[in-house]
Image: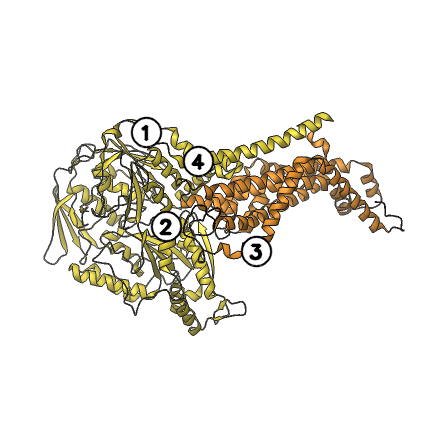
């Protein structure tokens, strides 16, 4: 901010401005204590997930080389006990974070990407085209997300990507509606008219002017969407619609249920993955709320 | 049908629509579970617990049995699943029955039977004291009509057609005498597991392929129980037949209640809401063993659990179809795959000892037919041997350590698994690792309904299992060429598209062999042949793991009487013989089980955690807004 004494090129100016806005953003974000808690929790969980290959290793998933016996209760060797194959539940919990987080992130990204594209196009072109697109959006909006996701996950082969797709394809309408509204608001500003007068085409207006202006909204929406996506992933896995060969938190709950852990009172099998899901979802929600509040303070007034 | 019934749902193509409906039902159930699961997943399993406490109703002595498998049809001409055929055992008499003690043939609707000298004409004497529940007497006329219907209407032969295919003529010479003439000798004449239906009710039925016998209640029958009510995937209710010739059952009502979730059923058992739960997991059995008023029955089962390999699906008109992996047509590949399966680990780890290691096709419980391979023939666990077999057959490892065939195609197989069966998934994990070490890839495809790809032949390997009856004819018949579908579009009674000349010859020989010892020998040779082909690899014979409340059921007959099972018997013995305790007539009240409370607590804690978090976040925001 203060170093811009040298003759600045356009790019360096742009970078400078970006750095400044990030700094401003962070300064405001810091004032939201809940957001900071969320961020810390996320950083910790992300660190655990990323270092999992070093700490627990991929072998933790192996059933043939499982170290313990079936369904052991917590002990010094296995702090959270073992599952029905004799694998360490703590190891699985850490390893499962990878899939749960990855699926959550990818699905939210996919959902928000679809929503943004649909929203911008519908808002930009307007007219009958917008009406048609928005009716399709409405159709998806009234459709119960989980039912649609279950149908998709059932019809397609069981894999992680199916789950990502099922969540992404079903949860975009809210984003689309928000982005369309913002697009219309942005496009009513005079500078868009000027850009058009100077020869800016549809593509230019949409990508250079509208997109950067809806980005904050999209960012907040993504952060909030991740927690929903993680919960949906866990739900699908719990309902047995995930990939049975990868370890995820929802899948662990499903395994626990199938092993009969509920009726035999093996709480150490059930509680940790459930609490982990709740914590991650909570952390993302806290972050999302904080981001939303910083970027768009007006958004919260009515609530 | 009855002879054999596969426990997980299996090929029965005509009822695809029904399956679809059921699938929708499952989806709906899942949906109802969602609000809980979405808030905090540990709470989800708590839902059934709450449900279990809901109605602890009282009344006369009711025997409630938890079931999970859907009814395919209540029509005895269509029903093939274990739940349906078990209920038909209760509602209809068969000509003969199996003794609870040792499964030998004993009188049912027929009191006596005798073959002619050439064994082609069988005369059955029908008992005089059996009455339909609407008061009319059950006669030879009813039996003759039932068999004739199956012989003339292919739609009526769907479930049990294998029994009547060889019948020439069935007549009732008088109300007490039934005469069956055969085209050629048939070994199953004293094991005709066909429910006899009342002619005066069933002759009004038009299309047998569509009539499911579930519109008018009570359903007219002459078994120990009468079906009085049925709601798809909710319950089947039966009342005792007071005029049953062997004596009326002791309980005042028998209810089969649906619990799609095993843990929910166990929770209901702990609460005393159900009296009996079959198909327990080892963990559930262990937990229930230590509880008072509950008895766990762990008995040798009558099922086998196998890996079936697709031998190249084909139909009777010679067309091949499906997309089974070509490498599986090579016996060396099949051999190597099974050499790398450690059955002891599967029994120890997956079944946790509640199973017997697999050998031949027929479980050891049927002693006279049980066969196991000689040492030289046996494919014992030998991963190094598997490597050698594959190397010798020309499947070399490539740079990435994957085995590749001569055609350059990698050995990547799919295995069809029942999404509802935890054992399938668990064993799938082991197979992936064992075969992965050999350089063979495996994709576990778990489906709610495996019938569609199965009937189309779109699978490489599949988890397979059948319950075997005391007479093994049916389980053997499903591997003969004659049961292949007529065209690729049809579905046949075949299990796994196996068509082997040698096996068929032996099958034809045993079917006409009346000498028990000689027939047993032929059946063993068939199993030996089946073992050598490597199309059906038996991994284990799972035990029947079930539990009942001793404060509701005073006594109950297992089959066989010593170390036998209760659910899915070859007769109606368990429910017919069950005696209620004195207190069962009053309410089924419960001992407060701590695990349930604990889980509720954990679930509630998680919900509160999320709730507090969200509330705190909102509160912060509102207060911040207010300050502005």
Q: Residues within 10 Å of mark 4 (few under 14, many from 20)?
A: some
- Residue B482 appears in which quarter of the rendering? bottom left
| Chain identity of mark 3 | A
The reply to the same-chain question for discs 4 and 1 is yes
Compared across the picture, whether B16 is left or right of A24 comes to left
CA–CA distance in space, label 1 to label 2: 38 Å
Q: Residues within 10 Å of mark 2 (few under 14, many from 20)?
A: many
The spot of residue B254 in percent (x, y) is 27, 34
Residue at mark 1: B589
Q: Which mark is residue A53?
A: 3
Compared across the picture, whether B598 is left or right of B254 comes to right
Residue at mark 2: B10
CA–CA distance in space, label 4 to label 1: 20 Å
Residue B534 visible in the picture:
yes
Residue B203 visible in the picture:
no
Tint applied to chain A in the drawing: orange
CA–CA distance in space, label 4 to label 3: 34 Å
CA–CA distance in space, label 4 to label 2: 38 Å
Front disc: 3 or 2: 3
Front disc: 4 or 1: 4
Q: Residues within 10 Å of mark 3 (few under 14, many from 20)?
A: some
Q: Where does the C terminus of chain A fall, quadrant-wise?
A: top right
Tint applied to chain B in the drawing: yellow
Residue at 15% over, 40% down: B139
């Amino acid at each position: 901010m203060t170093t811009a004494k040298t003759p600045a090129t356009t790019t360096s100016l742009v970078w400078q401005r970006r750095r400044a806005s990030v700094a401003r953003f962070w300064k405001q974000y810091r004032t939201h204590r809940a957001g900071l808690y969320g961020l810390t929790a996320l950083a910790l969980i992300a660190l655990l997930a990323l270092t999992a290959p070093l700490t627990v290793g991929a072998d933790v998933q192996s059933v043939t080389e499982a170290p313990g016996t079936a369904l052991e209760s917590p002990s010094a060797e296995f702090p959270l006990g073992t599952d029905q194959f004799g694998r360490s539940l703590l190891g699985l919990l850490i390893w499962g974070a990878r899939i749960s987080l990855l699926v959550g992130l990818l699905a939210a990204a996919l959902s928000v990407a679809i929503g943004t594209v649909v929203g911008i196009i519908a808002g930009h072109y307007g007219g009958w085209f917008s009406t048609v697109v928005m009716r399709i959006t409405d159709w998806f909006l009234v459709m119960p997300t989980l039912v649609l996701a279950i149908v998709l996950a059932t019809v397609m082969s069981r894999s992680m990507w199916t789950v990502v797709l099922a969540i992404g394809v079903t949860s975009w309408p809210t984003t689309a509606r928000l982005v369309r509204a913002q697009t219309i608001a942005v496009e009513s500003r005079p500078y868009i008219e000027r850009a058009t007068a100077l020869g800016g085409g549809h593509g230019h207006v949409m990508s250079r002017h509208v997109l950067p202006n809806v980005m904050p909204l999209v960012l907040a929406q993504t952060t909030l969407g991740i927690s929903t996506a993680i919960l949906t992933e866990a739900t699908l896995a719990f309902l047995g619609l995930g990939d049975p060969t990868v370890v995820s938190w929802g899948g662990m709950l499903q395994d626990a249920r199938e092993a009969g852990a509920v009726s035999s009172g093996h709480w150490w099998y059930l509680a940790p993955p459930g609490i982990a899901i709740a914590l991650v979802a909570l952390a993302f929600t806290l972050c999302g709320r904080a981001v939303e509040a910083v970027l768009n303070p007006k958004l919260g007034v009515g609530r | 049908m009855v002879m054999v019934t596969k426990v997980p749902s299996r090929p029965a193509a005509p009822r695809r629509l029904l399956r679809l409906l059921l699938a929708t039902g499952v989806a709906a159930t899942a949906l109802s579970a969602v609000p809980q699961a979405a808030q905090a997943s540990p709470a989800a399993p708590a839902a059934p617990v709450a449900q279990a406490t809901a109605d602890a109703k009282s009344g006369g002595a009711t025997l409630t049995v938890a079931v999970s498998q859907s009814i395919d049809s209540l029509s005895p001409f269509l029903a093939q699943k274990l739940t349906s055929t078990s209920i038909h055992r209760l509602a209809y008499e068969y000509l003969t029955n199996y003794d609870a003690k040792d499964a030998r043939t004993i009188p049912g609707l027929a009191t006596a039977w005798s073959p002619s000298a050439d064994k082609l004409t069988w005369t059955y004497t029908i008992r005089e004291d059996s009455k339909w529940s609407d008061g009319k007497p059950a006669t030879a006329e009813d039996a003759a009509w039932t068999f004739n219907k199956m012989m003339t209407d292919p739609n009526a032969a769907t479930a049990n057609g294998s029994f009547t295919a060889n019948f020439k003529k069935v007549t009732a010479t008088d109300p007490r005498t039934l005469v069956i003439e055969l085209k050629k000798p048939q070994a199953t004449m004293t094991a005709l597991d066909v429910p006899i239906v009342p002619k005066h009710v069933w002759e009004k039925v038009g299309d047998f392929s569509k009539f499911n016998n579930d519109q008018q209640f009570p359903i007219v029958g002459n078994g120990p129980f009468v079906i009085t009510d049925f709601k798809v995937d909710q319950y089947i209710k039966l009342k005792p037949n007071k005029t049953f010739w062997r004596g009326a059952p002791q309980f005042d009502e028998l209810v089969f209640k649906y619990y799609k979730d095993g843990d929910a059923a166990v929770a209901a058992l702990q609460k005393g809401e159900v009296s009996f739960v079959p198909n327990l997991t080892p963990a559930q059995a262990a937990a229930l063993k230590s509880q008072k008023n509950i008895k766990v029955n762990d008995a040798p089962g009558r099922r086998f659990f196998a890996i079936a390999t697709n031998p190249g699906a084909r139909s009777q008109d010679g067309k091949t179809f499906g997309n089974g992996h070509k490498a599986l047509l090579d016996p060396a590949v099949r051999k190597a795959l099974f050499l790398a399966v450690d059955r002891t680990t599967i029994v120890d780890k997956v079944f946790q000892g509640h199973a017997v290691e697999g050998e031949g096709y027929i479980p050891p419980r049927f002693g006279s037919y049980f066969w196991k391979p000689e040492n030289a023939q046996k494919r014992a666990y030998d991963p190094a041997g598997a490597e050698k077999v594959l190397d010798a057959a020309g499947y070399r490892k490539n740079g990435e350590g994957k085995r590749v065939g001569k055609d350059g195609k990698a050995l990547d197989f799919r295995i069809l698994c029942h999404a509802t069966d935890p054992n399938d998934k668990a064993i799938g994990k082991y197979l992936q690792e064992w075969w992965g070490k050999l350089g063979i890839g495996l994709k576990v495809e778990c489906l709610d309904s495996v019938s569609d790809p199965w009937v189309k032949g779109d699978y490489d390997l599949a988890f397979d299992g059948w319950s075997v009856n005391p007479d093994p004819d049916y389980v053997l018949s499903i591997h003969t060429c004659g049961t292949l579908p007529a065209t690729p579009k049809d579905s046949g009674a075949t299990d796994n598209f196996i068509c082997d000349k040698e096996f068929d010859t032996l099958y034809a020989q045993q079917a006409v062999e009346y000498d028990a010892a000689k027939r047993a020998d032929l059946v063993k040779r068939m199993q030996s042949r089946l073992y050598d082909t490597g199309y059906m690899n038996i991994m284990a014979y799972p035990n029947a793991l079930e539990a009942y409340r001793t404060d509701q059921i005073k006594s109950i007959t297992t089959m066989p009487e010593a170390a036998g099972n209760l659910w899915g018997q070859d007769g109606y013995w368990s429910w017919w013989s069950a005696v209620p305790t004195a207190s069962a007539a009053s309410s089924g009240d419960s001992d407060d089980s701590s695990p349930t409370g604990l889980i509720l607590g954990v679930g509630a804690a998680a919900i509160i955690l999320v709730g507090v978090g969200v509330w705190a976040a909102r509160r912060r925001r509102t207060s911040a807004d207010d300050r502005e």
